[in-house]
Image (cartoon, grey):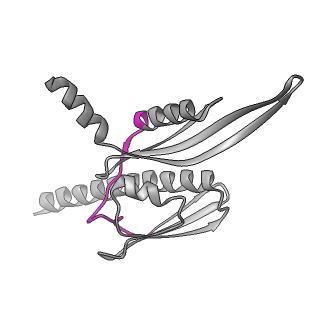
Amino acid sequence: MVNFKSTIEKKDMFFEKLLLVRRHTKVTKGGRVFGFSVLTVVGDKNGKIGIGKGRAKEVPSAIQKAMDRARKNLVDINIHNHTIYSKFIFKYCATKVVMLPGYEGSGIISPSSVRSIFEAAGIKNVFVKCFGSKNPCVLIKCIFEALLKMNDNFKAIALRQSLLKKTDKNKI
């Protein structure tokens, strides 16, 4: 009985959100064949986030595939006081995104299609401005890639600062 409860708690730990559902049509000799693609986001509201895409003939199975892929692709994001640590500009395909840290209580000011990504990551105060293509699939991918790139930059800055501290100690 205890093991069953712990598995339920592990599943409920994640925030899951369906971002996009699209229907595709393939015209064949026998008629039209419909398929669905789904984009989802999964996060623990504490810096872990993943996005997944699923395709299937029916919506529920596409959602299940997308959720499984999102859970497999979880990555850690560095957040500072429920916001990003500095201004960040990122370009992906035809979309350019400018992200600014928000003041405490300002909320998530962004396009509605990407708001769930920040909620899943645990970012509560951020300002996002998008230029170029506003296609939801590309915009979601752009924000996700920007958060990953920002994470790499944060690690590089931390490494530089630790190296500077070591060299300062050696000089003294």
4 sits left or right of 136 in the view: left
Query: Which of the two residues, 99 or 14, is positioned nearer the viewer here?
Result: 14
Magenta stretch, main secondary structure class: loop
Q: Where does residue 20 sit, x and y in percent of width and height?
A: 58, 48
User: Does the magenta segment cover residue 78?
Assistant: yes
Q: Residue at x 28, y 53 (%)?
A: 159
Residue extending farthest right: 29
Does 70 appear above or below 84?
Answer: above
96 sits left or right of 143 in the view: right
**Quadrant housing residue 96:** bottom right
Q: Residue at x 39, y 51 (%)?
A: 152
The part of the chain drawn in magenta is: 71-87
User: Does the magenta segment cover residue 140?
Assistant: no
Q: Residue at x 51, y 56 (%)?
A: 143
Does 29 appear above or below 104?
Answer: above
Q: Where does residue 129 sit, x and y in percent of width and height?
A: 54, 71
Q: Where does residue 29 sit, x and y in percent of width and height?
A: 89, 23
**Quadrant housing residue 131:** bottom right
Does 6 appear above or below 48?
Answer: above
88 sits left or right of 9 in the view: right
Q: Quadrant of the C terminus?
A: bottom left
Does 4 appear above or below 99?
Answer: above
Q: Quadrant of the N terminus?
A: top left
Query: Which of the two residues, 69 or 18, is positioned nearer the viewer here?
Result: 18
Residue extending farthest left: 172
Looking at the rendered structure, the number of numbered marks drawn on it comes to 0
Q: Where does residue 45 sit, x and y in percent of width and height?
A: 31, 52
